[in-house]
């Protein structure tokens, strides 16, 4: 089985999750159909653990492939 495709999202809001989420920070995300149906997003933190948060807290980024690869490699 292949690894899930990672994408990036920008945190816009962290109400109720101030300790866990930083506003204006880029986070890696993992596709999760069940979470999407529940209006949630699966986000990976600095430790490599993933958590569910309200999708409305984030803006998913659509970036050119080269930019996305560079950002993911740097992180």
Image (cartoon, helix red, strand yellow):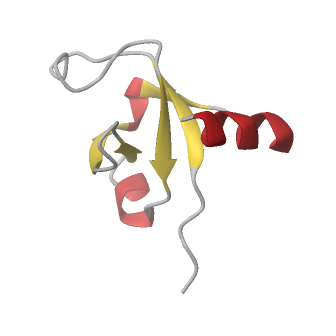
Furthest-front residue in view? Answer: 74
Determine whether 54 is above or below 52 in the image.
above
Residue 64 position, x and y percent, is 84, 37
Residue nearest the viewer, comparing 16 with 7: 7
Q: Quadrant of the N terminus?
A: bottom right
Q: Is residue 46 shown to the viewer in this render?
A: yes
As rendered, which of 59 and 18 lies closer to the eye? Answer: 18
Image coords of residue 59 (percent x, y): 54, 27
**Residue furthest bottom in the image:** 1
Residue 62 visible in the shown view: no
Residue 20 is situated, as x and y percent measured from the top left of the image, at 21, 26
Residue 17 image position (x, y, % from top left): 18, 23
Quadrant for residue 23, please give it: top left
Query: Where 60 sits versus 2, above or below?
Result: above
- Residue 72, compared with residue 32, is above or below; it is above
Query: Is residue 1 placed above or below 16 in the rendered structure?
Result: below
Q: In front: 66, or 30?
A: 66
- Image position of 40 (left or right of 11): left
The residue located at (57%, 53%) in the rendering is 6
- Image point 49% across, 41% down: which residue? 28
Please tell me which residue is depicted at 16% across the width and 19% down the height of the picture: 19
Q: Is residue 3 left or right of residue 16?
A: right
Instruction: State the residue in front, 53 or 51.
Output: 51
The image quadrant where one finds the C terminus is: top right
Number of on-image labels: 0
């Amino acid at each position: 089985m292949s690894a899930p495709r990672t994408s990036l999202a920008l945190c816009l809001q962290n109400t109720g999750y101030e300790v866990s989420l930083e506003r204006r920070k880029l986070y890696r995300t993992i596709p999760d159909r069940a979470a999407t149906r529940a209006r949630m997003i699966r986000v990976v933190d600095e430790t490599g653990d993933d958590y569910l948060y309200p999708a409305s807290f984030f803006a998913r980024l659509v970036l050119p492939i080269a930019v996305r690869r560079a950002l993911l490699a740097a992180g």
